[in-house]
Amino acid sequence: MAKSSGVESLTKLLKGQDAPISTVKANKILLKLGILEEKERESSTRPGLMKKYKALTAAGEDYGFNQENPQSPGQTSPYYYRDSFDDLLKLLLKEAEEEAAAAKK
C-alpha cells in the first residue's frame, strides 16, 4: 500500500468521508479486530495513577503509525494513512453492519 499522501487522526478521516460511524464506535471495532490495543502509562502529574491510551498493533501498521504525544511522554497516538483509509473504513463499516445484524437476532 502506498503511504505517501500523509496521515490524519481517525476523527478527521471519518468526518472527511462523512462516515456513518463515530470515532468511539470505530475505536471499539478496531480494538475488537486487533488493529488497536489499549496500553497504560503512569500519570506524569499523579504518581501511581495509570492512564490508558490506544495504540496501533503490528497488524494496524498497514493503516497507520503511532506517533509520540509531546504533551504525554511515553504515550503515543495513532495516526492513519490517507492512502489506506478507504480499506480500513470498509472493514469498520462491515464489522459495524455485522454487529447491528447480530444485535437484531
Image (tube, grey):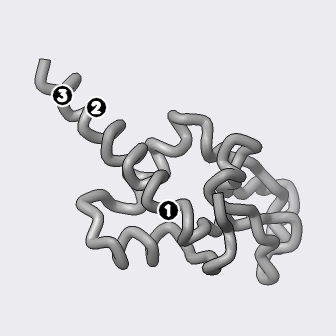
Disc 3: which residue = 101
Q: Quadrant location of residue 7?
A: bottom right
**C-alpha separation, residue under disc 1 versus residue under disc 3:** 24 Å
Residue 23: image quadrant is bottom left
SS type, badge 1: helix
- Picture residue at 55% right of the left edge, 60% below the top: 84
Q: Which residue is mark 2?
A: 99
In the displayed image of the protein, which residue is found farthest to the left? 104
- How many other residues sit within 10 Å of disc 3, few (<14), some (14-19) or many (≥20)? few
For the point 77% across and 75% down, which residue is it? 69
Q: State the quadrant of the C terminus.
A: top left
Read off the residue under disc 1: 85
| Amino acid at circle 3 | Ala
- Alpha-carbon span between mark 3 and mark 2: 5 Å
- Horizontal side of 54 relative to 23 (left or right) equals right
The residue closer to the viewer here, 28 or 66, is 66
Circles 3 and 2, Cβ within 8 Å, touching? The answer is yes
User: Tag on residue 27?
Assistant: none
Q: Secondary structure at mark 3?
A: helix
- Amino acid under disc 2: Glu
Q: Nearer the viewer, residue 7 or 12?
A: 7
Q: Residue at x 65, y 65 (%)?
A: 2
Residue in the foreground of this view, choosing between 43 and 39: 39
The image shows residue 48 at horizontal and vertical percentages of 85, 55
Q: Earlier in the sequence, mark 1 or mark 3?
A: 1
Q: Amino acid at mark 1?
A: Phe
**Left or right: 20 as drawn, with respect to 75:** left
The N terminus, quarter of image: bottom right
Other residues around mark 1 within 10 Å, as few (<14) / some (14–19) / many (≥20): many
Which callout, 2 or 1, points at the residue further toward the start of the chain?
A: 1
